[in-house]
Amino acid sequence: MTARLILNLNGETKGYVLWNDTEAYYEKLRSAYKDISDNKKNDYLYFSFFTLCAATLEYSLNFLLTDFCLNHYGHENYKAYAEGYINLPFAKKLLMTPTIISNGRYTFNTKTATYKTLCELITLRNKILHNKEFLKTFDTPPMTLENNQESVNFEILKEPNHIDRLNKLSCLNYGKALGQFKNMVMDLAIAHDLTENEIIVKIAN
């Protein structure tokens, strides 16, 4: 666990700390990723790993944005700015974070498989965690029973549930994308060394 400390050496008796607990998330992700890679199967592992991926990504983005605001606006004024960024829709927050924290110098290369996979993760997360059921229509034959007819045969095709898209391959892909995000965005940003790489590009002037 790491943290940022703000101390006033001019006699003030109150200090400030911004905890960085992101590594706790990534550590659990690595353990679950290994279980999936080793073909350990149970009814909830894929779903647990998937939701942990989504939570890890959002917490990472929230931390980076808060840390940025703390750097730029100070401990007395940072919170209003940080809350504005944190409350962005998840997908927009992902897209905008590198640009925000680099003061407009860098952005995601949106054509990369990593970025597209993270966007897919967010979209599927919203569909699974906020799933809703409403009436759906289907075609039926005429429902008039004739003579001694006691039944009418017809077929209803059910669309797959979003949660059924979770499998070993999809989970490993999400895990790899999170690993690349950590290495090429998260760790570099925390070290104030964000630069061009496989998934980050410089914004043309």
Image: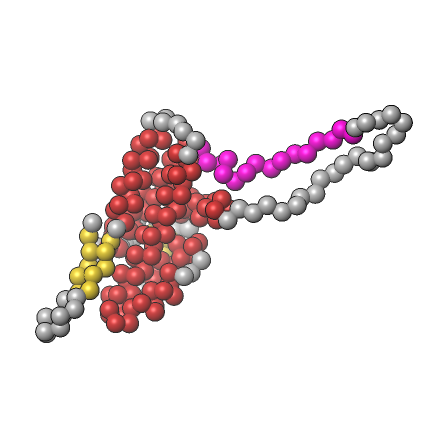
Percent position of residue 188, x then y: 25, 52
Q: Residue furthest right?
A: 147
Q: In the shown orientation, is residue 67 left or right of residue 49?
A: left
Residue 4 occupies which quadrant of the picture?
Answer: bottom left
Closer-to-camera residue (10/72) = 10
Q: Is residue 28 visible?
A: yes
Which contiguous range is marked in magenta? 152-167
Residue 160 in magenta?
A: yes
Indicate whether 77 appears above or below 87: below
Q: In the shown orientation, is residue 167 left or right of residue 184?
A: right
Indicate the colouring scheme.
secondary structure
Percent position of residue 146, x then y: 88, 30
Residue 37 in magenta?
A: no
Percent position of residue 65, x then y: 32, 60
Q: In the shown orientation, is residue 33 left or right of residue 166?
A: left
Indicate whether 167 appears above or below 130: above
Locate the C terminus by quadrant: bottom left
- Residue, x 29% and y 68% (percent of image)? 78
> Is the magenta region chiefly helix, strand or loop?
loop
Percent position of residue 172, x then y: 38, 35
- Residue, x 29% and y 35% (percent of image)? 31
Residue 35 occupies which quadrant of the picture?
Answer: top left
Q: In the shown orientation, is residue 66 left or right of residue 17?
A: right
- Residue, x 34% and y 44% (percent of image)? 178
Residue 159 occupies which quadrant of the picture?
Answer: top right
- Residue, x 44% and y 48% (percent of image)? 122
